[in-house]
Image: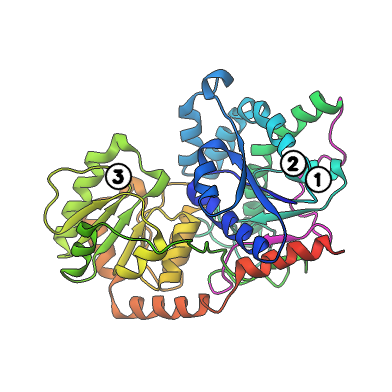
Amino acid sequence: MITIICSGSRGDFQPYIALAQQIKKLGKDVRITGFSQFEDFVKSYGIDYIPIEVDYKALGVDPKMLKQAGSADNPIKMLLTFNKMKKYGAQIAKQTYDAFEGSDLIVYHPGCTIGYFAAQEMNIPSVLATPFPMHKTNEYLSVVMYGKSKPTNINKKISYKMIQSMLWLASSNTVKEHWKERFGRMPINFKNPYEKVSKLQPAIVSCSNYVFPRPKDWNENIHQSGYWFVEENNEYKPSKELEDFINKGDKPVYIGFGSMFDSDEKDEIVKIIIDAITKCGKRGIISGMGKIDNLPDNLISVGSIPHTWLFEKVSVVCHHGGSGTTAAGFRAGVPSVIIPFSNDQFAWAHRAFDLGVGCKPIYKKDLTADKLADGIAYALNKDIVDNSKTLSEKIALEQGAFDSAKVILNVLQM
């Protein structure tokens, strides 16, 4: 049995579902563990799931703190917020450790290093599975500083120290407190494990080599061969209203901010979208912002829709720059307008522009109708449209999830 542990939002879970799908295809039992709110979502893909129950009130955790962790717009704020969340992590560690029982191998998200230390304690192998490049390299800045700092040698070193420290801080206290309670001691070799990469403890990365090429100075046991895309179980069937809207005119513009959308800002954001779409003379699909009354005829509001189905039917994807949404846009071959809110989203926004498949990033705090309209117009330039199609064709040549699943199974055969 292979157990995968991950954390984050629904979009963060999708690459790990893709990984589990390929492991299952290769004939090995696999399950995912994480917070209980994702149980139905993961199981809908036929993947076993062990839910971790989290009672924020019982833990004394302020929900605003969780929101701050997801919306911090610079690395220092991220580190400070994660440091405040020590109690939150420590209280859920017991359930997490119990979920590993019976595993032959543990695959862990970099924010869940309890997976690494549990594997050490159980004398089984582990694999670091990261949704973005995070290992030290002198070739480019890490995703917490890319596009926001000059790529000097010193800045590159600082940027990887920063991202690894942030992830380590997010999970190390969870591990430390649980081991003291459960074993009466600290874990063996209790240090940041991210660079401890070997044949028996490899790392796999969900990223296209056509987006961020695999650095030549990485350890040979760090494997990056493409994004991990979920295989949808059933063909999505849209509502008649949505189908009619898509078919009655030019391809619309997609606008959605996923888990970053704050309902408190709904009226302001919707007004910006309406004005921007009107200014650039386009039609638009607003996703994930709930019911919106009195929309003009050139706009429609929808709930959660598989990106694999929708993105190929739009002209531009405007979104927050989550790694999964960005990858889905690249895969669909349509230009991007990225409005980053926090964390690694800035990196994907800047990378889309650098690759010539999107407009310059429009930071959330600077978002206006004029800037959004200008971004959409820029993204629809022929060169950007052509570059987006070319990138999509290259990404289609990769088999990231399948290749990564094979790396995992090879470890079990050693």
Asked if residue 203 is among those painted magenta in the image, a careful observer would answer yes
- Tag 2 near tag 1, CB within 8 Å: yes
Label 3 and label 1: CA atoms lie apart by: 41 Å
Label 3 and label 2: CA atoms lie apart by: 36 Å
Could you tell whether 238 is left or right of 136 in the image? Answer: left
Q: Secondary structure at mark 3?
A: loop
Q: Do we see residue 385 in this rendering?
A: yes
User: For the residue marked with disc 2, what is the amino acid?
Assistant: Phe
Depth check: give the residue in front, 167 or 286. Answer: 286
Question: Disc 1 marks which residue?
Answer: 119
Kindly report which numbered mark, 2 or 1, lies closer to the viewer in this rendering: 2
Could you tell whether 295 is left or right of 8 in the image? Answer: left
Question: Disc 2 marks which residue?
Answer: 100
Label 3 neighbour load within 10 Å: few <14, some 14-19, many 20+: many
Q: Residue at x 24, y 70 (%)?
A: 251
User: For the residue marked with disc 3, what is the amino acid?
Assistant: Met
Image spot of residue 223 (x, y percent): 70, 67
Mark earlier in primary sequence (3, 1): 1
Image spot of residue 325 (x, y percent): 44, 58
Q: Which residues are magenta?
A: 184-210
Asked if residue 325 is among those painted magenta in the image, a careful observer would answer no
- Tag 3 near tag 2, CB within 8 Å: no
